[in-house]
Amino acid sequence: MSVKRINPLIWSEIEKIENSNIKEFIRELLLFEREHISEDKPRYSEIYDKLIEKYSKN
């Protein structure tokens, strides 16, 4: 998945976030959503839960 597929305005705003954990968390969420946007029923909650757990430990 390429950053180019995420709206550049959104991506540039994310780059301004100082907290690296929050920045990476948001990046991963957006990339996941973009990758699965065409699926009828993507399993967001499962991935969201994993990412929340991953970044809440930091």
Image (cartoon, helix red, strand yellow):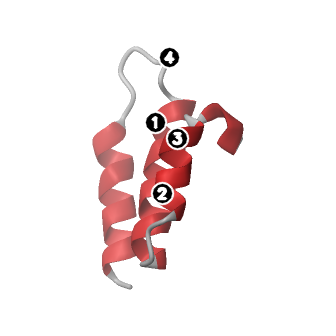
Q: Earlier in the sequence, mark 2 or mark 1?
A: 2
Which disc is residue 33 wearing? Answer: 1
Q: Quadrant of residue 57?
A: bottom left
Q: Residue drawn 37% across and 60% down? A: 50
Which disc is residue 50 wearing? Answer: none
Q: Which quarter of the rendering shows the C terminus?
A: bottom left
CA gap, disc 1 and disc 3: 17 Å
Q: Earlier in the sequence, mark 3 or mark 4?
A: 3
- Look at mark 2 in the image and give the residue it sits on: 14
Q: Earlier in the sequence, mark 2 or mark 3?
A: 3
Q: Earlier in the sequence, mark 2 or mark 4?
A: 2
CA gap, disc 2 and disc 3: 9 Å
* Mark 2 in CB contact with mark 3 (< 8 angstroms): no
> Which callout, 2 or 1, points to the residue nearer the camera?
2
Residues packed near mark 3 inside 10 Å, few (<14), some (14 to 19) or many (20 plus):
few
- Look at mark 4 in the image and give the residue it sits on: 38
Q: Amino acid at mark 1?
A: Glu
Q: Amino acid at mark 2?
A: Ile
